[in-house]
Image (cartoon, rainbow, N blue to C red):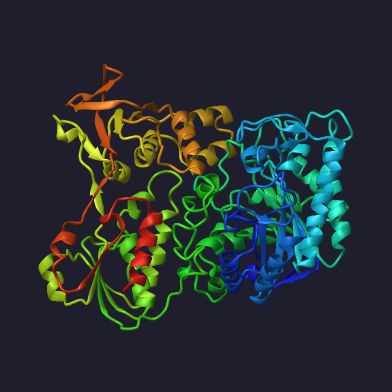
Amino acid sequence: MQLFKPVKVGSMDLKNRICMPAIHHAYTPDGMVNDKLVEYYRARAEGGAAFITVGGCTVDELGGGPAMIGLHEDKFIPGMERLASVIKDAGAYAGVQLYQAGRYTHSIMTGGIQPIAPSPIASRLTREEPREMTLEDIETVQENFAAAALRAKKAGFNAVEIIASAGYLICQFLSPLTNQRNDEYGGSWENRCRFGVEVVKKVKERLGEDVTLLVRLSGNDYMPGSNTNEEAAAFAVELEKAGVDCFNVTGGWHETRVPQITGDLPRGGFAYLARGIKEAVSVPVIASNRINDPGVAEKILREDQADLINMGRPLIADPWLPEKTRNGKTGSIRKCIACNQGCLDMVFTMQELHCAVNPLAGREHEVNITNAESPAKVLVVGGGPAGMQAAVTAASRGHQVTLWEKEGQLGGQLHYACLPPGKQEFITLVDYLRNRLEETGVKVELNREASRENIRDFGADKVVLASGAVSSSAPCPVEDESRVVNAVEALKGEINPGKNVVVVGGGAVGCETALAVSRMGTPDAETVKFLLENDAETPEKIKELMHWGTRNVTVIEQFKGIGKDIGMSTRWVIIKCLRNMGVAMHDRTAVKKITGEGVLVEKEGEETFFPADTVVLAVGATPVNRLAEELKEEQFELHVTGDASSPRKVTEAIKEGFDAALLL
C-alpha cells in the first residue's frame, strides 16, 4: 500500500504516511503535561502512526485557550520533554503546534484582557471587538512564536507546526475580511502575507535544519470575500521560500457556514484542497478532514492529491488503526462516526475530550483491561451498542459470554441512528462490534427474547441487562392512530407520509427526522453530478432542486429552542439545512390533540391547527427494564446499562457497557 511507503519530511524519515494532527483535549488545566496526556499519546504512538503533533500549544497567555498545553514559559519544558520522549520511544516522530488565536480569544480566558488582532473586527464566535495590534505588538507576538519553537526544540521534539488555519491570527492577517490596516501589514496581498512569512522566518531561524517546520494551512477560508484555494496556494509558495518543510492542509474557519468535520462532509471531501497546495509547492503536503478509512486514505495518495494523510479523530476512535491496516485487519478498525459528541462538542463547552465509540480515550492512565480474577459465565441481554460493548469487554477479560438479542440482527437503535442525513457512519460501529464479538468468542443468539424464567434457567453467574428502549407514546389524546408513526418508522422510508407532515418533538431525533422527510423528492448526489457535468441545468436551478422536496414539514417543540440537545458543533448545520428545506419550526408550542385531519396546538394561549397526512412522534424513549425489577431477587450478579437504565446518546451507551464489563 502507498499508505505504508516511507517518506522523508524535512529532517524526519517517516515509516508510513499516517499522521495525527494537533487536537485540543483540555487535559492540561494548568498547561502542564500530566499522566493523562502522556498515556493518551503513548497509545496513539504505539498504534502505528508515523508522526504525531500535540497541541495547540500556547505561545503567549494573550492568545491561548482553556486547558491548552503551555509552551510560553521555560517551566513547561520538562513536561514537554517527557511527552516527546514517550511519543518517540513508542515509535513515532513528535511535533508541536504553536497556537495564537488573535480575535478568536475570549477575554474570559485571559483574565478580562482584550484580545488582539490585525484590525478591531469582532468574530461571530466571541462577539468581542479585539484591539488593533501595534507594530510593537506584532514584533512581540512573532518573537513569542520563535521563543516557543526554541522551547520545543530544547524539549526534544522533531518538528514544529505553525497554525495558519481555522481563522486564527495568521489567517486574520492574510484575509481582507479581518485585515483593514493601512501600514506594511495590510492592504496589498504582499502586505497581508508579511506577518505569516515573518513568523515562519523567525521560527526557522531558531529551529535550524535539524527540526522540521510545518504550517497548518486553511486550504479555503470558505468565507465570502476571503481567501480561496488559489490564494492559499500562493501563500504556500511564499511560506516555502521562507523555510517551510511541509504543509498540513485543512478546511475553513470556525466561522464558516460550510461543515468541516461533521458527517455531512463526505469522507476525504477536502482532499482537493491539499491537491491545490501540492501542485503549487515542492515540499510534502498532508490531506485532512474526515479521512476515517484506510481505503479512502490510499485513494487520496494514489491519485496524487497529497503525500501524507491526517487522521485525528480516527486515531482517537482507534489508536491501532495504522497497525490493524498494515496487518490486513481492517475489519477490526473502530471507525470514527463523525458524531462530534465527545470531541468537538466538548471543546466548545470547555470540557475534557472523550470519544463516543472508544471508552478508553482519555482514560488510558487510569483504566486497564485486565483478566478477570475469577472467569464467570456471563449473560448479556440486548444486542444494541451497550450490550455488544459489554459482551466484547467481558469476553476480552476471560469471561464465558453469551449475548441474547430478541431481534434478528445486532445493533439496536444504531440501525436507525444511521438513517438521517449526515449520520451514515453510525452503521460502522455495528460492523466493528459484530466483528469483535466474533474475535472474542462471544456466543450470539438472535431472536432470543429474555424472561425471568429463561434467564434463571440459563444459570449465569453474572447478567448484564442492556435491553434498550422503545419510542415513547404521544403526549396528548390521539383520535386517529392510523395517521401516527414514530420517528423510526418515518426514517425507514417504508411509508408514504403524504404531502403534509407534522413532527412532534424538536429535539435531535425530531430535527433529523424532519430533515430526512423534507428531502424526499430531491435529486441525489449522482443526479446532481450528472446535471452539472452535462450542463443540463444551471447551477442555480440545481441548487433550487436540491432544496425543493415533495413534503411540507412542520416541527412542533413544547419547550424553548429547536434542537437544544444537539451538540454545538452539529446543531447549526442541522438548523441551516432545515431552513434551506423550508421546514417550519415552532417552539414553546404544546400539542393539544392529534385528529384525523392534523394537529391542534397551543402557543401563548392561542390555538392553531396544522393539517397533517402523517404525524411523526419524536418525543423521546422509554427504557425497556421490566426485567430489572423482576431479577433483583435472583442469586446472580446483575448490572443494568445503556438505554435500559436511561435513554441517552451512543456515547453513554458504549461507556456504560464498557464500565459494566470491567466490574464483572
Give me the residue at 54% from left, 47% from top: 350
Q: Does 310 sit left or right of 590 as displayed? A: right
Give me the residue at 60% from left, 71% from top: 42
| Location of residue 391 (image quadrant) | bottom left
Give the farthest residue toward the left: 453
- Residue 24 in percent (x, y) is at 60, 53
Name the quarter where the C terminus is drawn: bottom left
- Residue 477 in percent (x, y) is at 15, 30
Name the quarter where the N terminus is drawn: bottom right
Q: Establish if 85 lies above or below 471.
A: below
- Residue 411 in percent (x, y) is at 32, 59
Q: Does 308 sit left or right of 381 as displayed? A: right
| Res 283 visible | no
Give me the residue at 62% from left, 68% from top: 49
Q: Establish if 73 lies above or below 463.
A: above
Nearest the viewer among 491 and 436 is 436
Give the farthest residue toward the bottom: 374
- Residue 100 in percent (x, y) is at 72, 46
Nearest the viewer among 168 and 131 is 131
| Location of residue 586 (image quadrant) | top left
